[in-house]
Image (tube, rainbow, N blue to C red):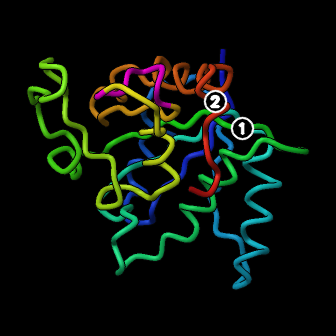
Amino acid sequence: MAHKCFISFKTEDISYKKEIQDDLDVDMIDKSLNEAIDSDDEDYIMRKIREDYLSDSTVTIHLIGSYNAENNYFQDQTYIKRELQASLYNGKNNTKNGILGVVLPSMYANIYKGEYTCSSCGAVHNSVAINDDTVVKEFSYNYYIPKGSGCGWSEEDRYCVLVKWDDFKDDPNTYIDKAFDKRNSSISSKTKVRP
């Protein structure tokens, strides 16, 4: 079944957005903003994005490239942050979206750090660096939702779904479905709009 998807991206990564829209076999109803809103008023722009694009979408595809970090002080993260906040908001005329983080190739080495042996449990875990140096807080908090105990996060402990670009290209609908299904999972009640 086609889901209504909004693509959140930095301008520098527009070629990936266009590839999703034009080249991939994605069963989605595209709710993305394709032309700039003609205004300098940030509040007006975000209101239009919320009302016209995000309010009836169900999955936000968040492209994670080299320009998305909370700690990247050379980039304005205002729109990315507010798009994710609006995607996570569940209220009047707006339902919470599933969030699918697609890691672009330029970020593979920064995010996927390999395996390590846990000093607490002795098991082998994958090291995934989702933090202020790789993404904005709205994504990192809802990927690594704080929990009471345990040394690792299972899929059930995370609201955001994460996938490498190459894997997404091979089977985009599976990952979009996973993000959509998170909306009705128990972890959905633990998300934060503004961490």
Please give the residue where the numbered disc 2 appears in the rendered image: 188
The residue lying at 34 percent from left, 70 percent from top is 71
Q: Which residues are magenta?
A: 151-158
Please give the residue where the numbered disc 1 appears in the rendered image: 96
Crowd rating for badge 1 (residues with CA inside 10 Å; few <14, some 14–19, many 20+) = many
Say if mark 1 contacts mark 2, CB within 8 Å.
yes
Q: Is residue 155 above or below residue 188?
A: above
Crowd rating for badge 2 (residues with CA inside 10 Å; few <14, some 14–19, many 20+) = many
Residue 66 can be seen in this image? yes
Q: Is residue 138 above or below residue 144?
A: below
Horizontal and vertical percent position of residue 74: 35, 81
Horizontal and vertical percent position of residue 48: 79, 63
Would you say residue 164 sits in the magenta stretch? no
Instruction: Give the residue furthest to the bottom.
Output: 40
The quarter in which the C terminus is drawn is bottom right
Q: Is residue 167 above or below residue 39?
A: above
